[in-house]
């Protein structure tokens, strides 16, 4: 796990540490903090102790699927934007994951850093609009 920076934080969840390091290295100049977790269990601990705005999870991990993990995130932290990465889900699996986990986006692996960066920037804007709407609805 890297230290988070003030502002927006993105949590990457993947059971392969090399992939997490690659994401962190490739996105280090982006305008958000990066947190990493090698399991859904560790990711839930991070969510409980850090401010996280976006979660990007791999689908296939030992001990549970990314879609099941993101479903749990949607229940516990509904304001967190959820993105699923997978290399082998068909259309039915994608639709189910999007519906059940209330996903913002579903990305196929391999994903380019440009596509991932663009998706994260769009997710940040989506989160800001949702947060502003919520504040307006609640009169804050």
Image (cartoon, helix red, strand yellow):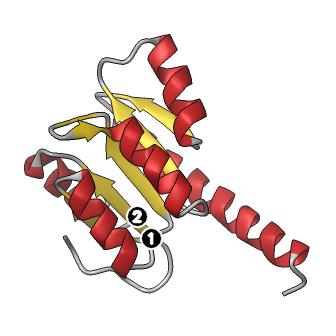
Dot 2 alpha-carbon crowd within 10 angstroms: few under 14, some 14 to 19, many 20 or more: many
Residue 51 sits in quarter: bottom left
Q: How many marks?
A: 2
Side (left or right) of 20 relative to 65 = left
Which of marks 1 and 2 precedes in the sequence?
Answer: 2
Residue found at x 82% / y 67%: 133
Quadrant where the N terminus is found in the figure:
bottom left
Q: Rounded to the nearest whole Å, what is the CA distance between mark 2 and mark 1?
A: 6 Å
Q: Where does label 2 land, which residue?
A: 10
Residue in front for this viewpoint, 50 or 73: 73
Residue in front for this viewpoint, 135 or 112: 135
The image shows residue 111 at horizontal and vertical percentages of 34, 33
The image shows residue 26 at horizontal and vertical percentages of 25, 55
Label disc, if present, on residue 16 of the rendered structure: none
| Residue 51 appears in view | yes
Q: Marks 1 and 2: in contact by CB < 8 Å? A: yes
Side (left or right) of 129 relative to 84 = right
Residue found at x 51% / y 46%: 119
Q: Which structural element holds mark 1?
A: loop
Which tag is nearer the camera, tag 2 or tag 1?
A: 1
Residue found at x 50% / y 49%: 82
Q: Which structural element holds mark 2?
A: strand
| Residue 114 appears in view | no
The image shows residue 4 at horizontal and vertical percentages of 33, 80
Residue 89 vertical placement versus 59 (above, below): above
């Amino acid at each position: 796990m890297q230290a988070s920076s003030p502002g927006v934080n993105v949590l990457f969840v993947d059971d392969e540490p090399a992939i997490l390091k690659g994401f962190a290295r490739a996105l280090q100049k982006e305008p958000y903090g990066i947190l990493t977790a090698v399991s859904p269990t560790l990711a839930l601990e991070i969510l409980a102790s850090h401010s996280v705005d976006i979660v990007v999870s791999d689908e296939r991990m030992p001990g549970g699927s990314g879609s099941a993990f993101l479903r749990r995130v949607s229940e516990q932290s509904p304001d967190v934007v959820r993105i699923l990465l997978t290399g082998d889900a068909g259309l039915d699996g994608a639709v189910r994951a999007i519906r059940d986990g209330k996903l913002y986006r579903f990305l196929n692996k391999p994903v380019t850093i440009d596509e991932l960066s663009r998706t994260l920037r769009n997710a940040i804007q989506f989160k800001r609009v949702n947060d502003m709407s919520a504040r307006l609805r609640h009169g804050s």
